[in-house]
Image: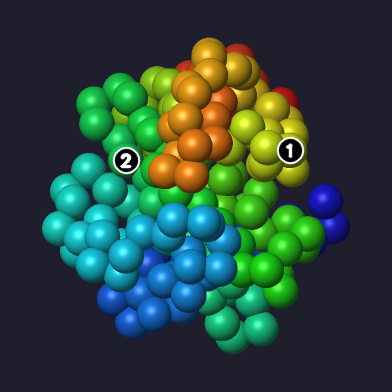
C-alpha cells in the first residue's frame, strides 16, 4: 500500500462547497442517486452524520456519509468518481469511516451493498465485514443488497485485518 499515507492525508471533513462535486459523483455512480437536497440535509442538518471527502489532483474525488447512533454505526453512502477509481481512494474513505465510527463510540458498523458490486464487497471483506443477509429488491431498480457488518472494538484495531 505505497499510496496509503498520501491518499489518507487527502481525506477531510466535507464542506458545503463540496456538495456540487459530491452530487456529480453520486449521479455518475448510482442508478438512483440521492438528490442534492438529501446530500445537503445529511451534511448540514443530521446530527448523527459525519461526512467527509477525499481529494486528488485538487478536486473532490470521492465522499462518504456515516451515521453513528450510540454504539451502532452505519455507512450510509460511499463513492469515488469514475476517473479516480482503482487508486485506493475508496479504501482510504472506508478506513477513515471505520476510524471515525470507532472514535464516536461505535462498536459495530453495518452497510448495504448492491449484490453485484464485487469490488466493493471484496473491499469490505478485506476490512472485516461479514455478510449478515440479503434483501431482495432493496434498490429502486429491483436489485438485491447484501447486508454486511464488522466489529469496531476488540481484536487488532477493530474492523481491519
**Quarter assignment of residue 20:** bottom left
Q: Is residue 83 visible?
A: yes
Q: Secondary structure at mark 2?
A: strand
161 lies above or below 143: above
Which label belongs to residue 118? Answer: 1
Residue at 67 percent across and 68 percent down: it is 82
**CA distance separating discs 1 and 2:** 24 Å
Mark 1 / mark 2, whichever is N-terminal: 2
Q: Is residue 158 visible?
A: no
- Residue 21 % position (x, y): 46, 78
Q: Which residue is mark 2?
A: 67
- Residue 67 % position (x, y): 32, 40
- Residue 78 % position (x, y): 51, 52
Q: Residue furthest right?
A: 2
71 lies above or below 117: above
| Circle 1 or circle 2, nearest the eye | 1
**Few, some or many C-alpha atoms within 10 Å of disc 2 (few <14, some 14-19, many ≥20)?**
many
Residue at 44 percent across and 32 percent down: it is 138
**Few, some or many C-alpha atoms within 10 Å of disc 1 (few <14, some 14-19, many ≥20)?**
few
Amino acid at each position: 500500500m505505497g499510496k496509503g499515507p498520501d491518499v489518507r492525508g487527502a481525506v477531510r471533513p466535507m464542506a458545503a462547497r463540496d456538495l456540487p462535486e459530491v452530487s456529480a459523483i453520486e449521479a455518475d455512480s448510482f442508478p438512483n442517486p440521492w438528490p442534492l437536497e438529501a446530500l445537503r440535509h445529511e451534511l448540514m442538518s443530521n446530527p448523527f452524520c459525519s461526512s467527509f471527502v477525499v481529494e486528488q489532483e485538487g478536486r473532490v474525488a470521492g465522499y462518504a456519509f456515516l451515521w453513528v447512533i450510540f454504539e451502532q454505526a452505519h455507512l450510509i453512502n460511499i463513492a469515488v468518481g469514475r476517473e479516480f477509481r482503482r487508486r485506493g481512494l475508496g479504501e482510504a474513505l472506508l478506513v477513515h469511516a471505520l476510524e471515525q465510527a470507532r472514535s464516536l463510540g461505535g462498536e459495530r458498523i453495518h452497510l448495504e451493498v448492491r449484490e453485484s458490486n464485487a469490488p466493493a464487497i471484496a473491499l469490505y471483506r478485506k476490512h472485516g465485514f461479514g455478510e449478515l443477509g440479503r434483501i431482495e429488491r432493496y434498490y429502486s431498480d429491483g436489485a438485491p443488497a447484501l447486508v454486511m457488518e464488522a466489529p469496531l472494538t476488540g481484536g487488532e484495531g477493530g474492523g481491519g485485518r
